[in-house]
Amino acid sequence: MRRLWRVPRAEPHRPPEKGGNFVTVTTTPRIALVISSSLPLLEDESGPLAAALTERGGLPEVHAWNATGVPWSDYDLVVLTSTWGHNDHREEFLQWCTTVPRLTNPANVIRWNSDKHYLQPLSEHGLPTIETTWLEPDRNYNKRDLHNRFPAQEEFVIKPAVAISAHGSGRYTATDADSRRYAINHAHRLLGEGHSVMVQRYIPEIDSHGEISLTFFHGTYSHAVRKEPMLSPGSEVVNTSSMAAEVSAHRASNVEIEAAQTALAFARARIPGRSVTSRPLLYAQVDLVRPSDGPPLIMELELTASFVHESCSPGALARFADAIMAEARMGPDSQNIDLA
């Protein structure tokens, strides 16, 4: 077993006691913080978060999700903190999620959120999202078919439906013959590898204003950051292990917060196994872009990894630690049913 960080245990662990409709943990909660062993350079919040949990009376330990010999069922709570790279082993990761009794966010949420097809029902429900054309590998598109499905004007983005950050994404110009040819080859390659492909109009305001990422703990707005653009014209991101978006503090407007809350309310009601009576998720992030001619557009919901960008959001890690301790002591949500 690879144990990356551990706090000395203060007392023997005892099983939780049942009370009412949920389990109340009456002992010092034992909490596992889950990271990825493949991208250790991005795991720099696990140590500070563990320290914050220790200050609050928790017993945190840090493990990679695919480490062997970890007794996941012994923990009062297992929190996915920064599991970057899981998309490369999605089915294995999802199978692991179903074996962890106190995983948060829970396995049914992770399955729904780890494939960006979730954007389709948001759009069909009338929520403002970026216009997307979906290309499925079982359609056996030839290159002419792809050419006919790309926008005729402006810039557009090619990306796989299962990916983290901008991995596998490319930005192209519709009216440039060379750029369009590169886009066709990019999409054709992804489809040939079995990926569903998204074709989206590139929102030019991303270049000037970036993306806005808003974070919520138990449904309550915590903070926001601004992410710098990651795609340059004519470029494809092929390796997110060596790069990440640059972020800075952002003061979210009421319009941005309301747009994010609306998206999360929809997800709460529509994720299989969840309903309006389900407890708000421990953590959630909503990525938006602000076009000049309309409301904020939903780019993504991030309900899997919980990187909070403490460096530009003072106090965010403390609020996250408070939420984790509250979640551990409330016990499982009886209104969330894992249907996997």
Image (cartoon, rainbow, N blue to C red):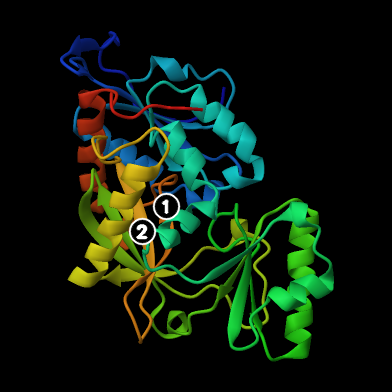
Question: Toward which corner of the image does residue 151 lie, by quadrant?
Answer: bottom right
- Real-space Cα separation, disc 1 to disc 2, in angstroms: 6 Å
Tell me the residue at 48%/43% (across/down): 112
Callout 1–callout 2 Cβ contact below 8 Å:
yes
Q: Secondary structure at mark 1?
A: strand
Q: Could you tell me which quadrant the N terminus lies in? A: top right
Name the residue type under label 2: Val
In the image, 250: left or right of 197?
Answer: left
Question: Residue 302, labelled with which disc?
Answer: 1
Q: Secondary structure at mark 2?
A: strand
In the image, 184: left or right of 80?
Answer: right
Relative image position of residue 63 (x, y in whole percent): 48, 31
Tell me the residue at 39%/32% (across/down): 273
Q: Residue furthest left?
A: 20
Give the residue at mark 2: 286
Name the residue type under label 1: Glu
- Position above or below: 215 against 156: above
Instruction: Please indicate, yes or no, whether residue 32 appears anywhere in the rendered image.
Output: yes
Relative image position of residue 189 (x, y in whole percent): 79, 62
Disc on the earlier residue, 1 or 2:
2
Relative image position of residue 123 (x, y in whole percent): 43, 62
* Residue 276 or residue 41, whichever sits in front: 276
* Residue 244 or residue 258, whichever sits in front: 258
Relative image position of residue 187 (x, y in whole percent): 73, 66
In the image, 153: left or right of 246?
Answer: right
Instruction: Please indicate, yes or no, whether residue 315 appears anywhere in the rendered image.
Output: no
